[in-house]
Image (tube, rainbow, N blue to C red):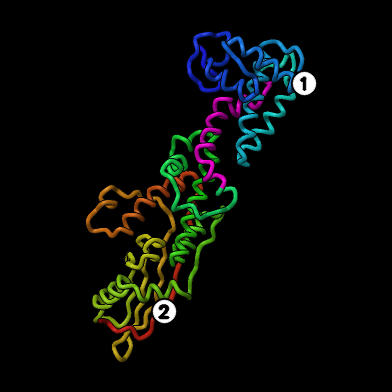
Amino acid sequence: MERCMLCGRKISNTRYNFGIGCLKKTCLSMHIDDIKNLNGEAELNRKIMFLCNKKRLPKAQSSMLTNRYLTLKILNEVPLEEYDNYKSLLQQDIDKIEKSTKVEELESFKQISLKQANEISKQYKKHENFFEKMMNGDYDVLQNLSFDIVRFSFSKYYSNKPYLNETTQRSQYFIWKSLAMSFKAIGFTFSGKCLENSLKRSPKDLEIISGKVINDIKKDDNFKNKMNNILKEHENEVKFNVKEIIRFGDGDLLLALHDATLNVIGERQIDDSWNLQIEITDRYDFTDYKEINEIIGGDTSLLERLGNIANNIAMISTSCNVIREYNISIKFSIDKWEVK
């Protein structure tokens, strides 16, 4: 059995390229009314030949022309730049079709089918409001973000389809960019900056030696407890150099730095206080899959759970090369630290 070239469903009559439902729908879009049966396909072919200024094409070439013309017509209704190359290639093949043209001579058949163009159109129309905001650079979409667009953007089913993956990657970028800007709007400026940097084609490593981030670290309870514990362990020494893992309690730091490496060089002073040289390093990446107990575990905060969910979703964007890895280095000193 053959398949309808618009929807892909099986059709029993091998003389035709459409099922009756798809034929009627297509003819209506071409302003051809009163199609009663599959013989209407011949009328559709004749009209498209007329519109393309082609005359008396054999049935095979006429069907090829109809296929390529409808594919282009459908894609022209999708105003995404990702499909401009397809549209250009389709127009070239339409111009090329003559009485003796063979399918293998038309490059567009290797790139995109009528069924695929129809699927692209359905996805665009389904999420048209989202795509319009995306094209206009309107990043205030998170509060109205639907589950369907998230599923479309991050589904491997769609990402593995060449004719859709550029669109899913662009929508992934748009969602992460919106999230980064939302972070900044609620005061999580560092995590917003880190996420934005990862969305660049070639993100530069971040090196921080002053500013709000360092002040936030110094005030973080987890950091202060970690430093006091380290100093107690080395209370009988004059100088030490240790390296440990640290996780922050501050929400902004927690989202930006994931189990960062803390390197501390301490030197005891005459009054038994400590001068400290501190470097915190982290690889900004999403390669550590979070298990279900880390997402719903009773010992984790709501922010950590949300962060773990975002981590697993971000792994998809990393594999799609939407989110890119880079290094973060934070260096500062503290004088006269007294153990409490």
| Quarter-of-image position of residue 154 | top left
Q: Residues within 10 Å of mark 1 (few under 14, many from 20)?
A: few
Q: Residues within 10 Å of mark 2 (few under 14, many from 20)?
A: some
| Quarter-of-image position of residue 66 | top right
Instruction: Please report the bounds of the magenta region as a residue range.
Output: 104-132
Question: What secondary structure is the stretch in magenta mostly built from?
Answer: helix
Give percent across and percent down for residue 244: 32, 66
Give percent across and percent down for residue 120: 54, 33
Q: Is residue 115 above or below residue 266?
A: above
Which is nearer the eye, 168 or 71? 71
Q: Residue at x 74, y 17 (%)?
A: 98
* 295 horizontally vs 332: left or right: left
**Cα distance in 3D space between marks 1 and 2:** 77 Å
Q: Is residue 125 above or below residue 21?
A: below
Q: Is residue 220 magenta?
A: no
**Camera-side mark, 1 or 2:** 1
Q: Amino acid at mark 1?
A: Asn
* 265 horizontally vs 100: left or right: left
Q: Residue at x 46, y 47 (%)?
A: 317
Q: Is residue 113 magenta?
A: yes
Identify the residue under disc 2: 333
Q: Residue at x 25, y 74 (%)?
A: 229
Tell me the tag on residue 53.
1
Spot the residue most to the left.
Answer: 298
Question: Image quadrant for the C terminus?
Answer: bottom left
Tally of marks: 2
Q: Residue at x 45, y 61 (%)?
A: 183
Q: Amino acid at mark 2?
A: Ser
Give percent across and percent down for residue 134: 55, 48
Q: Is residue 235 above or below residue 163?
A: below
